[in-house]
């Protein structure tokens, strides 16, 4: 890993150092959370508009439909204008944000040729993907 503190000379020549990596990772997390927030607000407003005349029954728990538990079902729901699908997409975007950070870290450590952190990032990514994609 490069231990220099990102001098102006390194920045001018496009050198990829720790400081630049931190800034990009921070932006990635900010954009991911903001995007998820905007999608969540839009979905929430549409949901409230679609269900404004209903009275909720808090004595009976009703979970989301089975179709919204899979990405393909969420996309199909968005195509049909289902506000609950838009809310579910926002949750998926929020979950995907730290995963994208791990992917970026893996690529950045590959560029820096830091073998130890490449291995650590790959293990973390493998554990995350296994948790998401394992059969239930």
Image (cartoon, grey):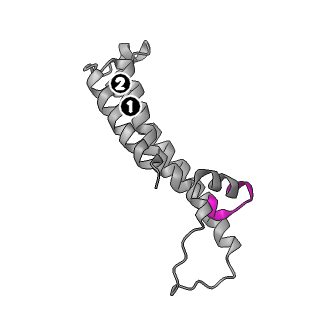
Residue extending farthest front: 135
The quarter of the rendered structure image containing the N terminus is top left
Q: Report the label total.
A: 2
In the image, residue 115 sits, relative to residue 13, either above or below, namely below
Residue corresponding to mark 2? 109
Q: Which residues are magenta?
A: 78-85
Q: Residue at x 67, y 78 (%)?
A: 52
Residue 109 at what x, y percent from top left? Answer: 35, 24
Residue 36 visible in rendering: yes
Q: Nearer the viewer, residue 69 or 1?
A: 69
The kind of secondary structure element at disc 2 is: helix
Disc marking residue 105: 1
90 with respect to 103 (left or right): right
Q: Residue at x 40, y 18 (%)?
A: 11
Residue 48 at what x, y percent from top left? Answer: 64, 72
Mark 1 to mark 2: distance in Å? 6 Å
Q: Quadrant of residue 53?
A: bottom right
Q: Quadrant of residue 56?
A: bottom right
Residue 50 at what x, y percent from top left? Answer: 70, 72
65 with respect to 33 (left or right): right
Residue extending farthest right: 80
Q: Label 2 crowding class (10 Å Cα cut-off): few <14, some 14-19, many 20+?
A: many
Q: Nearer the viewer, residue 120 or 51?
A: 120
In the image, residue 35 sits, relative to residue 24, either above or below, namely below
Q: Residue at x 28, y 19 (%)?
A: 2
Q: Residue at x 41, y 44 (%)?
A: 130
In the image, residue 5 sits, relative to residue 136, either above or below, namely above
């Amino acid at each position: 890993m490069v231990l220099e503190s990102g001098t102006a000379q390194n920045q001018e020549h496009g050198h990829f150092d720790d400081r630049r990596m931190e800034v990009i990772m921070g932006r990635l997390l900010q954009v991911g959370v903001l995007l998820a927030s905007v999608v969540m607000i839009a979905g929430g407003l549409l949901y409230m508009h679609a269900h404004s005349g209903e009275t909720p029954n808090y004595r009976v728990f009703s979970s989301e439909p089975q179709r919204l538990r899979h990405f393909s079902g969420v996309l199909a729901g968005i195509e049909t204008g289902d506000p609950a699908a838009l809310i579910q997409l926002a949750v998926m975007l929020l979950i995907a944000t730290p995963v994208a950070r791990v992917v970026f870290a893996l690529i950045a450590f590959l560029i820096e040729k830091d073998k130890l952190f490449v291995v650590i990032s790959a293990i973390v990514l493998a554990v995350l993907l296994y948790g998401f994609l394992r059969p239930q």
